[in-house]
Image (cartoon, helix red, strand yellow):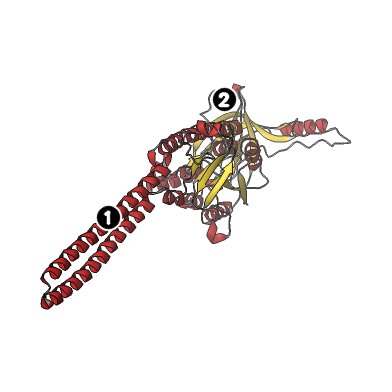
Amino acid sequence: MNKQGILAFPEERAELPALSGPFTVTRLNRAVRECLEGTLGPVWVRGELSNLRRQPSGHQYFSLKDENAQVSCVLFRSSASGAPPLRDGMQVELFGDLSVYEARGQYQIVVRRLQSRGAGELEARLRALQEKLRAEGLFAQSRKKPLPSHPARVGVVTSPTGAAIRDFLHVLRRRAPHLEIFIAPVRVQGRGAAKEIAEAVGRFAAAQDHGFPAVDVIVVTRGGGSLEDLWEFNEEILARAIAASGVPVISAVGHETDLTTADLAADLRAPTPSAAAEILSTDRAETIDRLRSLLRRLERDAGVHLTQARAQLELRAASGVFRLPLRRIGDWRQWTDDLQARGTSAVSARLALLQSSAGRAKAVLAARAPSARLAFWSDRLAALAQRREKATATFLQQRRLTRERHAHALELLGPRQTLARGFTITMDTQRRPLSSARRAAEEELIVTVFADGEIKSEPLG
């Protein structure tokens, strides 16, 4: 390998054999393989390792790339014993044979030897950015927002044609078809994609200012890929947009082994798009069981409240005021009559006394018969009569006021005011109050008294 180039191979090239067709695809790929292997031979190549895939067989497949191109490579288990542990972003030098994988027609390097040349530029930039943001507290657990328990509207920032959104929607249709999903279509790879994703997150977070639908949670997602494929999700502009969002953000980027700066800044990281959908959704059977449990609890609580209300109603209905309202009214009427009779008796007695005094005075005057005394006693009698009338009027007025106060108190304490407050009195046809549902059921017809009238009805038994 020379100092300026990536590849080193002999200057002399064997002349390519002429090909005549038509060929089958298998025969064509085999001819290309034989031509490539016979012409270039083993080469040394340096570059950055990416898109590493390890197989259970122990073989490792990866791409080797520089700023402008990439080539597929395979490191078989038999050749990996002296190689360092591989990871995406490594700068390596490898020695191997150029070949073609006939089944796919894929040009590749079969690696014989591989040695590390230090961490790749992208990996170094990523570590530096993440350390900077971590020092600012952007990844701190204390600033992460909890997800809503039962989100109803979900905003998804992703490519509308990628496999990630298909997997995401498939899980939600199966587990939570009631969720409303709003997709902000963006590019998820290539220069400028990070800015598009960040702007979509910001618009969902401030929906009222941008005409976006208001959502309960935002999901940023895409499928897996190499470090360079996922690089837009490692950009600082996206990490800051996620951290600034007032709406909780779930990051579901790549596969479980992929960890991006967006994952660290998000309120929750989901290992895959499908896992993000499972986090947001509740299984339908679980939801139905929970609703049934809540319904049973509601029925139980309602039954307890109804039992307590019925007991209170029966207790109040059994009290004296509601059981015998007519007796209370009769008592107050009798008391009023007693007061009236006592007042009349007192007035009559007073009048009789005055009449007796007048008779005695007349007898004395008649016995003495002096004209002056007669005039005196006449005036005295007139004054006494006036006082009697005034006293009688005052007494009657006082008795009338007392009776009105008693009548007003009786009205306040009587059943009419109680009826006006929404209560009723249930009686039989003989106007006798019924104090229990059992007695009411024994009647053929019952009368329910309201504040503004009566209703006759038949008991249900």
Residue type beneath disc 2: Ala
In whole angstroms, how far apart are the C-alphas of marks 1 and 2? Answer: 132 Å
Say which quarter of the image contains residue 11.
top right
**245, above or below 312, in the image:** below
**363, above or below 414, in the image:** below
The one of 230 and 295 positioned closer to us in this rendering: 295
**371, above or below 246, in the image:** below
The one of 184 and 177 positioned closer to us in this rendering: 177
**Label 2's element?**
loop
Left or right of 40 on screen, residue 347? left
User: Circle 2 sits on which residue?
Assistant: 80
> Does residue 8 appear in this view?
no
* Residue 370 place in picture, x, y as percent: 11, 75
Q: Quadrant of the N terminus?
A: top right
* Residue 82 place in picture, x, y as percent: 53, 25
Residue depicted at x 41% and y 40%: 324
Q: Which dot, 1 or 2, sits closer to the camera?
A: 1
Left or right of 181 on screen, residue 365? left
**CB contact under 8 Å: marks 1 and 2:** no
Residue type beneath disc 1: Ser
Tell me if mark 1 has few (under 14), some (14-19) or many (20+) residues whose alpha carbon lies within 10 angstroms of its own: few
* Residue 73 place in picture, x, y as percent: 63, 33
Say which quarter of the image contains residue 46.
top right
User: Circle 1 sits on which residue?
Assistant: 345
**Label 1's element?**
helix
Residue depicted at x 61% and y 37%: 63
Residue depicted at x 39% and y 38%: 319
